[in-house]
Image (spheres, rainbow, N blue to C red):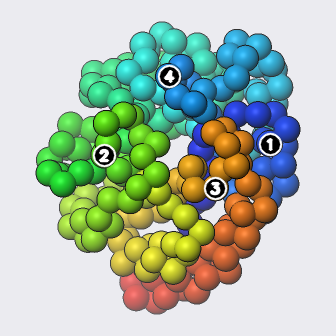
C-alpha cells in the first residue's frame, strides 16, 4: 500500500519524515491560499530538489506553464491536480513532462463515476477526497462504501480525514477494492499546518505495514 504524506513544508520537518520507514511519497502544496503552501516559494529550491523521496506537487487550477516550471525546479515525480483542470490540460502536461499525473475528485452526497471518464486515459492515478467548500483540507471522510461501485481499472488513492484510528478500516478497504493502491494522509497527523507529528506518522505507518502484508497475501490468494 502506497503511503503518501501530504502538506509537507518545513525543511526540518521534512528531514524527520525521510527517516520514517514506510513512507513512499511526500506531497508539497503549490497553492498560495493553502495554509500548507510551500514556504519561501522560489527560494531554497535546491534544498527541496535534493530530497530523495518521490515528491508530489499539488496544484489547483494552475497554468500548464507554471506547473511544468515547478516540476523542473523542484524535481517533482508527480503532479496532483486538485482543482477543475480540463482533460485538455492533462493532455498538454502528459506531452510535455514525464511526471506522473494524479487527478483528484472530491466525493460528496451527489456523486457519479461518469465524471471520471474523460480522464481515464490521461492519468496514472485518481485520488478521492472529501467534497467541501474549498479545494481539499476538510479533515472529514466521505462514505468509503461508495468505492465498492468503482467501475474502472485505473488505480486510486484514498484521502480525506484519515486518522490513526482508521488502520483497520483502511486495510478492509484495501482488501475489498482491487483498484485501491494507497492512501494520502495530512491534517490528522499535524501539530500545526504544514508541520507533521512525526512520531504519530511513524506509529501509524508501522501499523499499516505490519497488517498490510497480511492483506496483500490474502488479496493475492483470492486472485489465484
Element under label 1? helix
Instruction: Give the distance between the C-alpha atoms of the residues marked 4 and 3, in whole angstroms.
Output: 20 Å
Across the whole image, how many numbered discs are drawn on residues? 4
In percent of the image, x 21 and y 61: which residue is there? 151
Asked whether residue 101 is in view, the answer is: no
Query: Considering only order in the chain, which callout, 4 or 2, is on the residue closer to the N terminus?
Result: 4
Q: Earlier in the sequence, mark 1 or mark 3?
A: 1
- The residue indicated by pointer 3 is 189
Image spot of residue 130 (x, y percent): 35, 50
- The answer to which of 128 and 188 lies nearer the viewer is 188
Q: Judge whether 175 appears above or below 134 on screen.
A: below
Residue 217 visible somewhere in the drawing: yes
| In-image side of 61 versus 210 (left or right) | left
Q: Earlier in the sequence, mark 2 or mark 3?
A: 2
Lower sequence index among marks 4 and 3? 4
Q: Quadrant of the N terminus?
A: bottom right
The image shows residue 128 at horizontal and vertical percentages of: 36, 51
Residue annotated with mark 2: 131
The secondary element bearing badge 3 is classed as: helix
Pair 4/1: label in front: 4
Seen in the picture, residue 109 relative to 133 is either above or below; the reply is below
6 w.r.t. 181: above or below: above
Q: Which residue is mark 1?
A: 13
Give the image quarter of residue 223: bottom left
Q: Earlier in the sequence, mark 2 or mark 1?
A: 1
Q: Which mark is residue 33?
A: 4
Amino acid at each position: 500500500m502506497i503511503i503518501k504524506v501530504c502538506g509537507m513544508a518545513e525543511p526540518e520537518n521534512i528531514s524527520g519524515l525521510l527517516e520514517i520507514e514506510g513512507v513512499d511519497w511526500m506531497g508539497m502544496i503549490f497553492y498560495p491560499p493553502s495554509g500548507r503552501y510551500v514556504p519561501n516559494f522560489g527560494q531554497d529550491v535546491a534544498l527541496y530538489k535534493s530530497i530523495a523521496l518521490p515528491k508530489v506537487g499539488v496544484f489547483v487550477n494552475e497554468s500548464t506553464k507554471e506547473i511544468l516550471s515547478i516540476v523542473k525546479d523542484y524535481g517533482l515525480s508527480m503532479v496532483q491536480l486538485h482543482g477543475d483542470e480540463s482533460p485538455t490540460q492533462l493532455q498538454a502536461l502528459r506531452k510535455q513532462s514525464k511526471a506522473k499525473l494524479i487527478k483528484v475528485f472530491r466525493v460528496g452526497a451527489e456523486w457519479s463515476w461518469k465524471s471520471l471518464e474523460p480522464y481515464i486515459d490521461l492519468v496514472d492515478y485518481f485520488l478521492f477526497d472529501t467534497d467541501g467548500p474549498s479545494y481539499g483540507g476538510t479533515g472529514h471522510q466521505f462514505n468509503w462504501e461508495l468505492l465498492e461501485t468503482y467501475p474502472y481499472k485505473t488505480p486510486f488513492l484514498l484521502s480525506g480525514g484519515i486518522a490513526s484510528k482508521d488502520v483497520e478500516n483502511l486495510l478492509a478497504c484495501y482488501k475489498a477494492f482491487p483498484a485501491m493502491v494507497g492512501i494520502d494522509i495530512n491534517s490528522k497527523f499535524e501539530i500545526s499546518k504544514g508541520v507533521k507529528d512525526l512520531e504519530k506518522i511513524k506509529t501509524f505507518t508501522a501499523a499499516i505495514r505490519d497488517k498490510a502484508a497480511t492483506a496483500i497475501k490474502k488479496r493475492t490468494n483470492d486472485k489465484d
